[in-house]
Image (cartoon, grey):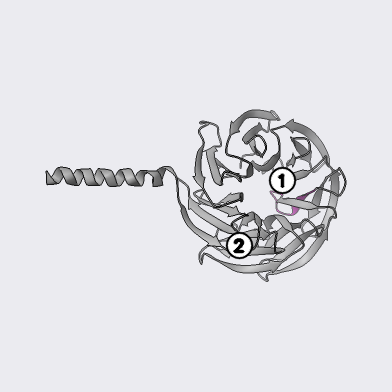
Amino acid sequence: MRRLKGYLFVLLSLLILLPAFSNPLASFRIRKIGKAPNFIALSPDGKKIYATSYGTDELIGVDLTQKMVTQMIEVGSHPLGLAIADQGKTALVACRDSGTIAVVDLDASHVVADIKVGGLPNSIAISPKGYRAYATNYGRTAQGQLHIIDLRERSVLATIKMGVSPFALAVSPVTELVYVVMGGSNEVWIVDPGRQVVVSKIPVGDGPDGIAITPDGKRVFVANSQTNDLSVIDTQLKSVLVTIPVGKMPFGVTVTPDGKRVLVVNSASRTVSILAADLSSLDVETFEVDRGPTDVKVGPDSRTAYVINELSNSLVVTELP
């Protein structure tokens, strides 16, 4: 009888623990990440993460080993998108209301150059070779722009006219084609930066915001905030393969470095959705984060997820199953 009671106790304990395995819990949170942080970028070694603080006009550096903020660097007015270049030594920050791309020396913790683009720059991405950057710009008229930036000269090489509200962008690691989310037309425009022309336009869901591309360049994932779904684009066919429902108001998207999984931030649901990048299964898993999540990145191990939360001013770090 005692042995039976012991078995029942163990079984009950396991049943209590089961939800923790089916819904991964955050390993830790780091709070007071500026004010209204929006976007994040990881250092190549995965030891540091940087966030733009829209409310304080800063780039915030977080040491993930110490689990604390170690840098608060003044940049331009209302910073949004950012990218890390030069093997983790330099950050590029799109400063919306300054009309500039701030070039930040991360070792020295200060801005070393401001690249003037005008308008309202919002997102930025680095080319696979690392010596060019691409920045989207709302513009101050109905027409937006895509800027091609020479990082060695710290100057704008070319500006390509776009449609209404170009926002997030992703660069193919294989072809270097640039995929730009067009919020005004609910499309993704494909730009050939060599010829400086738009080569294709792909309809997606309503209110597209976030975008990410697989390491092999074969698929692009677009988060549609108004239709609460994810459009999956085949880059060879230049068309949407499937549209997958996720949470409410999906925003930021990322693909794990091993190319196996896609993570989507659902801003209104306070969750992150996880699904298979190869579409071998359309099942979607979710885990909860803090209020107002906007962006997500995954470390070099493809197991550690980092979620920035605009309304909570926090960074959630969690191990994926």
Point out the residue furthest to the left here. 1
Task: Say which residue label 1 marks.
Answer: 168
Residue 218 in view in this figure? no
Task: Say which residue label 2 marks.
Answer: 33
Residue type, numbered disc 1: Ala
Q: Quadrant of the C terminus?
A: top left
Answer left or right for 17 relative to 293. Answer: left
User: Going 57% across and 36% down the picture, which residue do you hit?
Assistant: 246
Q: Which residues are magenta?
A: 127-137
Residue type, numbered disc 2: Ile
Mark 1: few/some/many CA within 10 Å (<14, 14-19, 20+): many
Q: Quadrant of the N terminus?
A: top left
Q: Quadrant of residue 18?
A: top left
Q: Quadrant of residue 249?
A: top right
User: Going 65% across and 31% down the picture, which residue do you hit?
Assistant: 234
Secondary structure of residue under mark 1: strand
Mark sitting earlier along the chain (1/2): 2
Nearer-the-camera pick, 85 or 310: 310
User: Going 30% across and 45% down the picture, which residue do you hit?
Assistant: 14
